[in-house]
Amino acid sequence: QVQLVESGGGSVQPGGSLRLSCAAAGLTFSTYALSWYRQAPGKERELVAGVSSAGGSPNYADSVKGRFAISRDNAKATVYLQMNSLKPEDTAVYYCNAARSWDKRAYWGQGTQVTVSS
């Protein structure tokens, strides 16, 4: 059974930092592209950052470029999202996603809440 379990969310003041983790089990982690999405109340889920299975150059939403960094540790089957200089508009539920294009398998975590407020 595939599981993606996020952790590291919480409440932080503007300008603060958080590091999200997503630990995977039950899949061949290194063969999956990994992404972080977020969904704010009343808004659609949006892609925040992604990294390919080969671990090449990550891609980021324009709104988080220069502030967020995605990384993966295949040995630990974990993907991270380092979030710096957080803004109130970063408030959302953050989800990790693992996807494999050749067989179209995709999995989601349960989400972790990030709240940025003074």
Image (cartoon, helix red, strand yellow):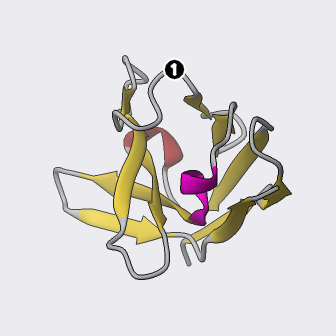
The reply to whether the magenta stretch includes residue 59 is no
Evaluate whether residue 26 shows in this view. no
Image coordinates for residue 26, horizontal then vertical, percent: 58, 65
In the image, residue 35 lies at what x, y percent? 43, 48
Mark 1 highlights which residue? Answer: 66
Q: Quadrant of the C terminus?
A: bottom right
Name the chief secondary structure element in magenta: helix
Viewer can see residue 84: yes
Q: Which image quadrant for residue 65?
A: top left
Q: Is residue 40 left or right of residue 17?
A: left
Residue located at (65% from left, 40% from top)? 80
Disc 1 marks which amino acid? Gly
Q: Position of residue 66 (x, y in %)?
A: 51, 20
Q: Identify the element where label 1 is drawn.
A: loop
Q: Position of residue 14 (x, y in %)?
A: 75, 44
Q: Which residue: 83% across, 52% down?
A: 12
Can you say which quadrant of the picture contains the N terminus? Answer: bottom right
| Left-right relation of 19 to 28 | right
Q: Residues within 10 Å of mark 1 (few under 14, many from 20)?
A: few
Q: From the viewer's side, name the closer residue of 74 and 60.
A: 60
Number of callouts: 1
Q: Nearer the viewer, residue 26 or 72?
A: 72
- In the displayed structure, does residue 55 sit left or right of residue 82? left
Q: Quadrant of residue 46?
A: bottom left
In percent of the image, x 35 and y 52: which residue is there? 47
Give the vertical position of 77 relative to 96 (above or below): above
Residue toward you, 102 or 57: 57
User: Residue drawn at (68%, 68%), measured in percent from left and top?
Assistant: 112
- Please give the range of residues in magenta: 88-92
Name the image quarter holding residue 51: top left
User: Looking at the image, is 3 positioned above or below residue 56?
Assistant: below
